[in-house]
Image: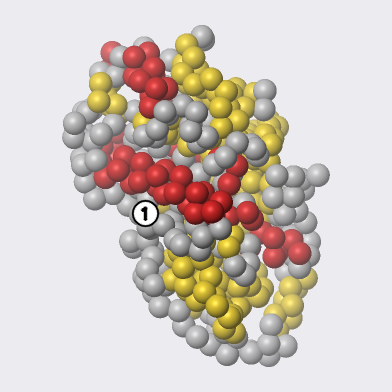
Amino acid sequence: MLLTAPLAAILLLVVSVAADPIVVRKSPVSLPIARHLNITGAHDLIRKDQARARNMFAASKVKRSGSSASVSITNEGVVYGASVGIGSPPTFYNLLIDTGCTNIWIGGGKSYVHTSSSVALSGTVCESCGSGFCGEGFSDIVTLGPTLVFRASIGVASASSEGFDGILGLGPPDLTTGTLSIIPDILFSQGIIPDDLVSVSFEPTTNVSAPNGELTFGGTDSTKFTGTITFIPVTTTFPASEFWGINGSIRYGASTTILSTTAGIVDSGTTLLLISTDAFNRYKTATGAVLDASTGLLKVTSTQFSNLQSLFFTAGGISFELTANAQIWPRSLNTFIGGTTSSIYLVVNDIGSPTGSGLDFINGYTFLERFYSVFDTTNNRVGFANTPFTTATTN
């Protein structure tokens, strides 16, 4: 059963600077995260999302083949970062929150600082995910938030995402190749958190950078969602099954089918809501939108926007509604994606492959900012709930 509890005091006993800390805790742990817009111009947003989708296809094939090769690193369009300390005393790294990867990876943006707590692991470690990495492995002290301290293994890569120091992976355990720690798993196994899961809360914002997110390890935060959480089992369809993949369908308005029930993934590292090419064409026809040459996104007129119907994503027997406002890019940020201030752009786009590929949709950040999400390793499932921002007119 999921536990919802306020943050409690942590009893932290540090035997010495070089020794491992002992953490005594049995309640969820929350960590604030901040949004950053990582876009440099026209077509950059859709280019990054589609490249990430291709990498996920490639990564799943690499993993299934048993190869240790990595795939190329993709810089996401909208990213969330958290400050994570590594070492004793800790060096703090700004790490991307990525449910498409599993482990902690640092390097590139800021070099790994060896301290008395650093212990080298043998061999090369790799992870094939939305952003592929290979590098050296170390066991070290990790600090999450002001007081949560524990030992975990990390990967040290030779490159990192632009503007960030690495990755805080929150993907499913099956993505891992090698000996690295999976953070929710290790916190649960050490009795620090009561459940092996992580919950994510985002909020829509019209700012380029804003501290408007929260991770909760080991439980849920009832202040961040409304109603009940609907859980959907992880799909068995490859390659969505390699990630936080679920089965779902999409309709426009009351009865227009955009995508029949199929497999896709939930991914915080993708910005847009991507759907298979044939589904994208159906959505384009239903909305009357046209493809904008400057941004690569669909564009609607003011009249079309006023007539835009809700988009419903159905999974686990429940329909999650994306209102007309939830389907558009924040208009105050149009110039950052190569658009014009007076235009209205849609956040639904083409994944770049036809239905039936085994990964036919990606519910990215623009979906997750409207719904509370839970990634439950113990029960192999993903949960969604409405939030106070599900029907917000922020954009």
Q: Residue furthest right?
A: 1
The residue under the point 74% across, 81% down is 13
Q: Is residue 261 left or right of residue 285?
A: right
Q: How many marks?
A: 1
Residue 107, quarter of picture:
bottom left
Query: Where residue 221 appears, x then y in whole percent?
Result: 66, 46
Residue 81 seen in this snapshot: no
Q: Residues within 10 Å of mark 1 (few under 14, many from 20)?
A: many
- Measured from the top left, where is residue 213 in percent x and y? 51, 49
Q: Is residue 122 above or below residue 200?
A: below
Judge whether 310 appears above or below 297 on screen: above
Name the residue at 21% across, 42% down.
42
Quarter of image, res 71: bottom left
> Residue 294, image x and y in percent?
18, 35
Q: What amino acid does circle 1 point to?
A: Thr
Q: Which residue is mark 1?
A: 74
Residue 89 horizontal/vertical position (percent): 55, 84
* Viewer-nearest residue: 290 or 220: 290
Residue 377 position (above or below residue 114):
above
